[in-house]
Amino acid sequence: MTRLKTIGLALCAGLILASCGSDKSASTLDVLKGIPASIKARRTPPPPISAAQIAQALQSTNKPVALFQLENRRNAQVLLSEVERNGEYQTFGNQARQAVVMRDGMITASRGLGGDLMSTEEDELLYMIQSRAGGNVSYVQRFLTPEYKTKEVIYHCSVRPGAGGHTPLGRATMPTSSVGVSCQAAGEASFENSYYVAGDGTIVSGRQWMGETLGYLDTQLLRY
């Protein structure tokens, strides 16, 4: 539904309520004045997950927990805990059947988010990031189209090691090294990812491209 249709329906509803209500003290003008505020309230971004909610999530389970934020969906946040581990791959999920699959902190797939990343070929890129080395590598992402066909995008990526620092991990911080990645593919949107890598090679925080539908997903491992 377009924004104009939404406003039109709201105006109609307001006029009906004003004309049919038994309380004549509220005039039609009063009702109309309140409509912009109600429309604005619907567009208000959801509140961010609080430190108290994060602490509660960590206390409620001994499993790994991660925080994800979708930038192009008004920075909507979700806390997911590990529901499956298969070798190097961890699946973080919730009861809403939303899931993100990660390999040492790099996203390799998602489900239930809409426009999901189906799979990747990340070996070369992940090795460069974990090695904190500069260079050029290939990287593949696959998506399921509305016609239920697999779309494969082959990117050519440049990896740039950055400076060291400290990154939040749950209620603590840990030393990390930053790594920037620039990727391009013919006919596709280019993107810039950033990763913060712990001493053991785990990407504990980052900004990762999930395709044109999902955009960037900010990731933070709270426990791994």
Image (cartoon, grey):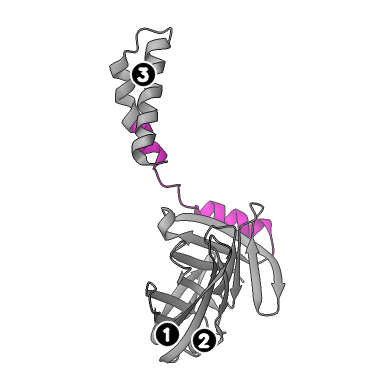
Q: What is the three-letter code of the residue carrying label 1?
A: His
Q: Does residue 19 show up magenta in the picture?
A: no
Could you say whether the residue bearing mark 3 is in a helix, strand or loop? Answer: helix
Secondary structure of the magenta portion, mostly? Answer: helix
Instruction: Tell me residue 206's x, y (percent).
Output: 46, 72
Distance between the alpha carbons at the discs numbered 3 and 1: 57 Å
Q: What is the three-letter code of the residue carrying label 3?
A: Leu
Instruction: Tell me residue 163's x, y (percent).
Output: 38, 84
Could you say whether the residue bearing mark 1 is in a helix, strand or loop? Answer: strand
Instruction: Tell me residue 78's x, y (percent).
Output: 54, 56
Residue neighbourhood size for the residue with mark 3, other residues' Cα within 10 Å, grouped as few (<14), some (14–19), many (≥20): some
Q: First in sequence: mark 3 or mark 1?
A: 3
Residue 195 is drawn in which quadrant?
bottom left
* Relative depth, front residue between 63 and 103: 103
Residue neighbourhood size for the residue with mark 1, other residues' Cα within 10 Å, grouped as few (<14), some (14–19), many (≥20): some
| Residue at figure coordinates x 41%, y 58% from the top left | 72
Residue 82 is drawn in which quadrant?
bottom right
Numbered badge on residue 130: 2
Distance between the alpha carbons at the discs numbered 1 and 2: 18 Å
Distance between the alpha carbons at the discs numbered 3 and 2: 61 Å
Q: First in sequence: mark 1 or mark 2?
A: 2
Instruction: Quickly name the residue at label 3.
Output: 15
Quarter of the image containing the N terminus?
Answer: top left
Numbered badge on residue 156: 1
The residue segment tinted magenta is: 37-62
Which dot, 1 or 2, sits closer to the camera? 1
Numbered badge on residue 185: none
